[in-house]
Amino acid sequence: MNASPSHQPHPAEWTETQGLLPSAERDLPAGRHQLHKEQMMAQIHEDLRTATATATRVAPVKRPNPFLRRTVLLPAMAFTLAGAVVGGLALTGGGADDGKTALATGPALTTQVGTADAKGAPGLLDRISLAAADTSVPTPHQGQYVYIASKVASTYYREDGDDSKVVSDELHSRQVWNSLDGKDGWLIEAGQTGDNGITLASKVPLAGAYDALAELPTDPDALLQRIYRDSDAHRDAEVPRDQAAFVAIGDLLTESYPPAKVGAALYKAAAKIPGVVAVDDATDATGRHGIAIARENPADGERTEWIFDKKSLRFLGERTVVVKKVADSRFKVGTVTFTSAITERSIVDANKQIPGQAS
């Protein structure tokens, strides 16, 4: 499950990117990081990355890789991330470039765009929901942590003097630990933190943590109503509300460990969102082929895909693919702007403990 990238197929074919638009520097796809209050985390991320950089070095313009993709879903935690930052979210332990090995870059990640089928989405999501409900998910107890290991890569626009082009980070490992209430945690990510990682301690509970997920309604209609209500309150105005709800659900499925009934309800809720489609073929970050549930954001022409094993319907990972060219984008159709693969999901007894190791 934790094989190195050298022993795994590449997430997408490496090809040269041509025909870039000579437009002004563009930030992230409209609203995705604002939607989840990730802009704050991204800024902290950039501060950590560039704190020891020389005055002449130009930081790459790229999709931020937030330390935690914590989606705000509970009204009482509406300003969770803001409170975490203002209240003293500790991001220490690795330092800006302390022990950090730079990731190699290559041409844009590209893929064949899978065929979308709107009519097939409800039936596929119903099957996925049934499979999720039938999955044996351990019930953690107080003091334990949710551990998630993954492989990730992204494509972004890098501007460094006269050398401006679309590049991608190499496929690399990411390990996240979260306490059940989200007040304690740790992150180790190649190229982003030092080898020892950084702490994700917070003074406030976080909505993406296990305790908060366990309190979500399991009735799909009630759950979707809550998702819409809270994503409406915090999404960027340019992001359509249906897309905001879809991304919110996806974030809860990626770096969390929802109870089986909640996971099943999230899939049933997703089936009720207009514009959700089934995709006949999609590949996760480690090259595993599967089927996908997806939705296109018309504002940026990018389609978010949740990828599942074709037989077991187990969640494999997520990717974002450019499926439509928009005027201000430097990305060609078929560009994979982000890809991930879950390699292990487990409950451990201590922060920074690896599954199978004694605490």
Image: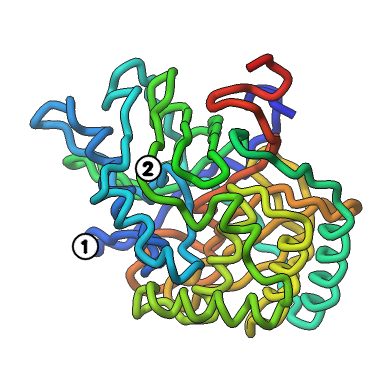
Query: Does residue 135 appear to the left or right of 42 in the view shown?
Result: right
Q: Can see residue 122?
A: yes
Are there few (<14), some (14-19), or many (20+) residues within 10 Å of tag 1? Answer: few
Q: Can see residue 150?
A: no
Q: Which residue bears the numbered disc 1?
A: 24
Q: Earlier in the sequence, mark 2 or mark 1?
A: 1
- Residue found at the very far left of the displayed protein: 55
x and y percent of residue 48 in the render? 26, 34
x and y percent of residue 233 in the render? 39, 78
In the image, 13 versus 2, the foreground residue is 2
Q: Residue at x 58, y 63 (%)?
A: 304
Kind of residue indicated by mark 1? Ala
Looking at the rendered structure, the secondary structure element under dot 1 is: loop
Check the picture and name the quadrant holding the N terminus: top right
Are there few (<14), some (14-19), or many (20+) residues within 10 Å of tag 2? Answer: many
Check the picture and name the quadrant holding the C terminus: top right
Up/down of 193 relative to 85, above or below = above
Residue 7's disc is none
* Residues at marks 2 and 1 touching, judged by CB atoms closer than 8 Å: no
Looking at the rendered structure, the secondary structure element under dot 2 is: loop
Give the alpha-carbon distance from disc 2 to disc 1, as whole Å.
37 Å
Query: Does residue 179 appear to the left or right of 191 in the view shown?
Result: right
Query: Does residue 263 appear to the left or right of 38 in the view shown?
Result: right
Residue 202's disc is 2
Count up the numbered dots: 2
Kind of residue indicated by mark 2? Ser
